[in-house]
Amino acid sequence: MASYGFNDQYSSMASDSSERRRVGLIYDERMCLHSDPNDLLPLVKPDKAREPHPECPDRIRAIWNKLHSSGIAQRCVVMEGKEVEDKHIELVHTKKHINLIKNVSSTTNLRREELANKYSSIYFNEGSTEAAYLAAGSVIEVAEKVAEGELDSAFAIVRPPGHHAEENQPMGFCLYNNVAIATRYLLDNRPDLGIKKILIVDWDVHHGNGTQKMFWKDPRVLFFSVHRYDSGTFYPGGDDGSHVMTGDGLGKGYNINVPWEHDRCGDADYLAVWDHLLIPVAKEFGPDIILISAGFDAAIGDPLGGCRVSPYGYAVMLNKLLVFARGKIVMALEGGYNLDSIANSVQACIEVLLQQKPVIGTLEAYPFESTWRVIQAVRKELSSFWKTLAERLPEKVTSMRTPFIQVVSSDSEDEYDNFPNRVSQDLEKDIDNVIQPFSDLKVNDGPGITSQASIISHTWRAELSKIDIWYAAFGSNMKLSRFLCYIAGGQNGWYHNVLYLGKENGIPILTMTCQLSDVDYFKSGKASMCKPSKEYANTLIRGLVEGKQLTEEEATSYIQQATNRPL
Ligand code: X5A
Ligand code: ZN
């Protein structure tokens, strides 16, 4: 498979790499005091147990612990949190909103619940006020240090997040708009620091509606948000996140939205947006400092995002920004709800800020066709404001794309009923492209459990890791006796216990299952390829029998044989 490659390693390495970059890291355990009071209910009434709230204290603890156990935190300048002053919050929020957040922790549980219910996706508890003041104050603290030059760059591990919070309302787990407050602080309160133009990059999977509104007419701030939009159905919903929302008055052209049409966007899609939108515009804008609304809910494994950015992808995205503003970058945590994904992604970013090793590697995937459509639409919409966007993109670039095939959930089997008839000629061609790599797989000629076998198994896995969609005759929809699609990767993770069931119509049939946490280990090739568990083998057998594909005897023998086949 060819790669949508890039080769920018060393592009932003400090000229003297022995020179240590000063990277600030700010964290305060008191930000863990804010949590959903409903998460305590199971203790009181076990029958009322529900899913814990995703925006939980363990998010920042997981990041903090990971940075310490890996030794990365020890290489940073660690700072304690600081509370924001009301006069600075007032730069972007109304007095009424400040009063709400200021008083919410000293009222009764009942009143807090009533208040929270007035807003979209908001909870309050006794710790909310303090956490909100610390989150905003901590972002100001590091932003000031970076602007002054005392730090080269910084990461604020804060919660609650901020980018959905609007002038007069909390929203989407956000109380104060941390990044917006710090931005206005630098521009309005610290003219002495010489920060006149600020680029805000919002890579949280959700649109930064609050930040967009706060700088709607402000040409000093270029707000760039890439987010899932799904025709306006993805949170926060409506058309605020549309690409036609470009700002107003003097600020027209200084608001750039890149709205994904669907889920499953990954490294290749984000990097295409970087290469063909963000980076050229940033060059033309010439920011004095960059603030990143760094949500990690577009990461692989996030329960809310449905996207597929890897820690490596975040590292490359960040590395490409490091050439601007003499590397003055302030990152502030926004969303991100898979504890492992956020810890690994933040770690990858801080390694980039520390610049102790180059960011190297290639991408083994192409952007979706829809990604090119979105990029072209944004370029067209903004071409009169940014001359770099008026140029045509070469076709040889935009023709490199990954086919998009609609995923139908495997437990809603009814939706499959007409599927084979809906396979268009185009789709068939796409399917061929996806399956093509299998023709190189050496799956059946391994000489058993030898080192050769492990090389083959490794190669096989490396091949598998490039593929989005696998087709199988018997997937989790084994009851249907048709050719059905079986999806791997993305939100549901890579499957483990990969089992090759032989070929059907020349197509390799695979079954697989795994825990998300096994992904890295699995992809490293260290895990040995193994038979499925007895239970899973029995599930396969039952499916084949109940689906009237084979008799019980035949199915058992088929699966037994397959599980014993060397890979
Ligand atoms: C900061 C952030 C998400 C809100 C989702 C509400 N908020 N359904 O990621
Ligand atoms: Zn988010």
Image (cartoon, rainbow, N blue to C red):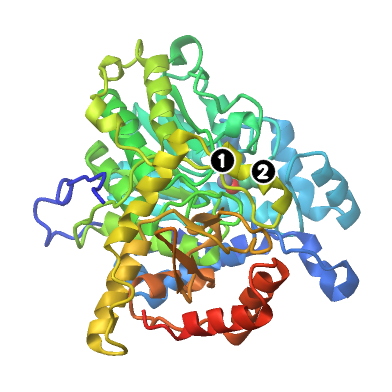
Judge depth for marks 2 and 1 and give the one in front: 1
Crowd tier of the residue under label 2, counting other residues whose Cα lies within 10 Å: few below 14, some 14–19, many 20 or above = many
Residue at x 73% of width, y 47% of height: 122
Residue type pointed to by label 2: Gly
Comes first in the chain, label 2 or label 1: 2
Please, what secondary structure does the residue beneath circle 2 have? loop
Q: Residue at x 46, y 44 (%)?
A: 265
Residue 522 horizontal/vertical position (percent):
40, 74
Do the residues bearing badges 2 and 1 touch, measured as CB atoms within 8 Å? yes
Instruction: Say which residue label 1 marks.
Output: 206
Q: Secondary structure at mark 1?
A: loop
Asked whether mark 2 lies closer than 8 Å to ligand 1, one says yes
Q: Is residue 387 above or below residue 431?
A: above
Q: Using the image, tell me which numbered label, if any, was put on residue 172.
A: 2
Residue 431 can be seen in this image: yes
Q: At 55% across and 46% down in the image, what residue appears?
A: 136
* 110 on left or right of 459: right
- Left or right of 21? Residue 26 is right
Task: Name the kind of residue labelled 1 in the image.
Answer: His
Q: Is mark 1 within 8 Å of ligand 2?
A: yes
The extreme left residue here reads 16
